[in-house]
Amino acid sequence: MKDKQSTKTQTTKQLIKTKRPSRFKRLLKNKWLKNTSSTLAIVALILAIFIVLNVVINNLKLNPIDFTAQKVYTLSDDSKNEISKIEQNVTMYFFGYDETSTPVVLGRQYEKINDKIKVQVVSTSERPDLATEYNISSTDQLVAVSSNQRYKVVDNSEMSVYDQSSGGQVDVTEQKLTNAIMDVTVSSKPQIYFLTGNGEYGIDSSMPMYTFAQYIKNDINDVNTLDLLTSNMPETCDVLVIANPISDFTDAETEKIQNYIDNGGKIMWMQDPYLNIQNYNSDNYKNINKILGEFGISFSYGIVCEENSDNMIQGYPDALIPNMTYNEIVKNIYTDGKIVMADAGKINTVDSDKLSELKVTASSFITSSSKSFYKEKFTSTDSYIKKSSDDDTKGNYVLGETLVKQINDNTKATLVAYSNAFFATNYTMQVGNSYTYPIYLRNNKDLLLNTIAYLSDREDSISIRKQTGTEYVSFETASGKQDLIVRIIIFAIPLVLIITGIIISIVRKRKK
């Protein structure tokens, strides 16, 4: 038995020894690997092949492999469906990004879905014309989405938000970019009118509401002014903005606004305290109060101040950081940075029985803290309010409120009221050692734009929110790392193995 196994083993070894190598192997062994220069030529050829493959693959601009559970780097079916319908030419200019950044990765996918969409990764130095057109600085990181009709700018800070429903930070890059493309290609835009003629804050370049008006335009709205003394209420008015009138409306103006309300009008009203109006007399504001009375509210004469350090800016009691209650307007900002109001008044709302008679539903969503106080009397030494006095009343006060009035079975009128207009302006405000516009503070801009979107029924057409956990994640860094790992696996490791094999073969031949 052992002899048979031994004979079989010897026969197998003989077969292995006598098996001739292929012609290619013999050629490689005898002609090339014995010659050092020939060996180097083979190595160079292999390297060249990999370099060419690398260049070709890079030019193909393949999407990084998406390892994230929420598919942060992959367009959703909702986006693909909407983008495929776009018939206008759209260019997406990415400033401050590189090819591995999440917005650019998604942008390249838009290009593949619809050839009407083009992506350019640029800098202000390369395209100073675009920097001027879109008012972009060299430090900005943003996306300018442009069609033949209009453009919209999406700042990098808008790509991630805190979401109440999930309780964590979510990535909304795809949502913002998809909706921006849809916005710049829509056939019609909401019509927003700023009321004039009564000392209101204006929107001309030198006026307090100029910056706010520009933000509204960038959000794909038409912005106009309206003087009801010389014009009728436009039928196309989607939102009427009333920003701090300091003189009363005429009877004619009042009638036109009341008719607008009866037809289901939408109004955003911002009013600074009447204390700021010289020689104020409530009897001189009967028509303004008549319109506000349609919704059961009035604005205050005095100012709300804080004693709670968490609800004020750098110890200034009249620079408020109000509390917010979750609603459609503040749903994405009420736990993330909040807002700042300076020298704000309070909103006085009638009791529930009176609201019921008026067929009004009131919902306060911005309030001062329980440690705040309301102040009407000031002395000449009050450069700013330091503390409350016996003349002041304490309690939490309403600073922002939504009021919906049921006109009939099919019609509702809506008023969003703020007891501060200064917080929406481009007046200069000192915070610490720096100066800024109030609209730039915290989430002021977002609150204001959310209000316009709420009143004009222009919330994002699609909502795509991808959970990233409770901590902010640097998507650009993650994308770059994933891409690098894939490239190492596909290219670097096989290349190292091939070169190692060639070196080992040369060393063995030399030993023989």
Image (cartoon, grey):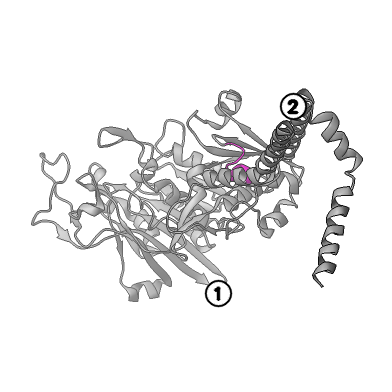
Tag in front: 1 or 2: 2
Name the foreground residue: 215 vs 496.
496
Magenta stretch holds residue 421: no
Tag 2, which secondary structure? helix
Q: Does residue 182 appear to the left or right of 451 in the view shown?
A: right
Q: Amino acid at mark 1?
A: Asp
Residue bearing mark 1 = 409
Q: Residue at x 29, y 50 (%)?
A: 284
Question: How many marks overall?
Answer: 2
- 180 vs 189, nearest the viewer: 180
**Residue 291 appears in view:** yes
Counting from the top left corner in percent of width and height, residue 275 is at 23, 47
Q: Is residue 393 above or below residue 281?
A: below
Looking at the image, is 507 positioned above or below residue 161? Answer: above
Q: Which residue is mark 2?
A: 40
Give the crowd class for mark 2: few <14, some 14-19, many >=20 residues within 10 Å.
some
